[in-house]
């Protein structure tokens, strides 16, 4: 069984500040990890993914995440927030034995203040 | 290239009725996934179709069903609608579902409201 916990349902930052969205997962098998972003009234867009290999993953729009097996974490960061980053972010996990089935966290709404 | 398209965008049904939601995957994609995004419940996996067959199913009652057509488009049917079925239903497609690290592209969703 797999689960994802996103710490903080709402995160607020100032424009130009560091963005840190936290994600912890539970998986009985080596996980594949994803971050998606959802803008209002839209579907999900993949920001980045970790499957195997390098644990620091770079994605679109300046976001990156680091897979830390010992901490079962996959936190999302961005050095400098832009107003356009305001959206809801979802961390998700899947496993090879669960083809196509993504387990999502509850989501974190990111607000960016001028 | 067209992305994943879903229709209708909005759907209003009465409790007890049936709803049919449609999804067209990206050209060349053979796998289609359905997810429910209900208020307060987050995103939950519903169904996965690949090559015309149901491959995986989430923890939903049998009144949630679907199918995949030879052109890989898909329908999600919800029978005997209940108020709590009101949600955004998202469809996603990928080039193959047998490799879990294949990126899934999502559509804009169908907003189902049950009154």
Image (cartoon, coloured by chain):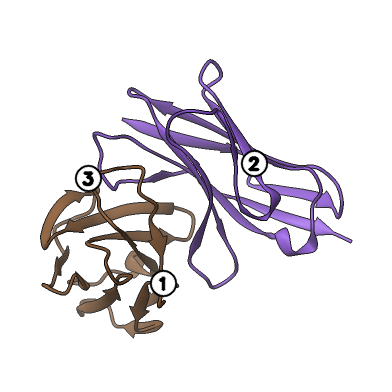
Work out how far the residue at label 3 is from the one at label 2, CA to CA, in angstroms: 26 Å
Q: Which chain is brown?
A: B
Name the residue rendered at 63%, 46% in the picture.
A9
**Residue on which disc 2 sits:** A64
The image shows residue B41, relative to residue B19, as above or below, that is above
Q: Nearer the viewer, residue B2 or A111?
A: B2
**Image quadrant containing the N terminus of chain B:** bottom left
In the visual, does A25 lie left or right of A28?
right
Name the residue rendered at 33%, 22% in the picture.
A28
The subunit letter for the residue under badge 1 reads B
Q: Residues within 10 Å of mark 3 (few under 14, many from 20)?
A: some
Q: Check the rendered structure and report the hue given to chain A.
A: purple
Work out how far the residue at label 2 is from the one at label 1, CA to CA, in angstroms: 27 Å
Q: Is residue B33 visible?
A: yes
**Residue on which disc 3 sits:** B98
Name the residue rendered at 41%, 61% in the picture.
B105
Residue A39, position as x, y percentages in the image? 60, 66
**Residue on which disc 1 sits:** B109
* Tag 3 and tag 2 share a subunit: no
Total count of labels:
3
Name the residue rendered at 51%, 23% in the picture.
A72
Q: Is residue B115 visible?
A: no
Q: Residues within 10 Å of mark 1 (few under 14, many from 20)?
A: many
Q: Nearer the viewer, residue B29 or A114?
A: B29
Q: Residues within 10 Å of mark 2 (few under 14, many from 20)?
A: many
* Tag 2 and tag 1 share a subunit: no
Kindly check if marks 3 and 1 are in contact, taking CB atoms under 8 A apart as contact: no
In the visual, does B35 lie left or right of A45?
left
Kindly state the secondary structure of the residue where label 3 is placed: loop
């Amino acid at each position: 069984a797999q689960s994802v916990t996103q710490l903080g349902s709402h995160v607020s930052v100032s424009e130009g500040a560091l963005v840190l969205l936290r994600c912890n997962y539970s998986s009985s098998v080596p996980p594949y990890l994803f971050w998606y972003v959802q803008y209002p009234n839209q579907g999900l867009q993949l920001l980045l993914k970790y499957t195997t290999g390098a644990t620091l993953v770079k994605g679109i729009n300046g976001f990156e995440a680091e897979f830390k097996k010992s901490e079962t974490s996959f936190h999302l960061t961005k050095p400098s927030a832009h107003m356009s980053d305001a959206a809801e972010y979802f961390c998700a996990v899947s496993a090879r034995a669960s083809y196509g089935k993504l387990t999502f966290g509850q989501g974190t709404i990111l607000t960016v203040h001028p | 290239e067209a992305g994943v398209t879903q229709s209708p965008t909005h759907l209003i049904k009465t409790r007890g009725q049936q709803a049919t939601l449609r999804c067209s995957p990206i050209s060349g994609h053979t796998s289609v996934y359905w997810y429910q995004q209900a208020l307060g419940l987050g995103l939950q996996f519903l169904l996965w179709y690949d090559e015309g067959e149901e491959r995986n199913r989430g923890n939903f009652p049998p009144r949630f069903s679907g199918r995949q057509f030879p052109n890989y488009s898909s329908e999600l049917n919800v029978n005997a609608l209940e108020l709590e079925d009101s949600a955004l239903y998202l469809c996603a497609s990928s080039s193959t579902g047998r490799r879990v690290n294949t990126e899934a592209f999502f559509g804009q969703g169908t907003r189902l409201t049950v009154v």
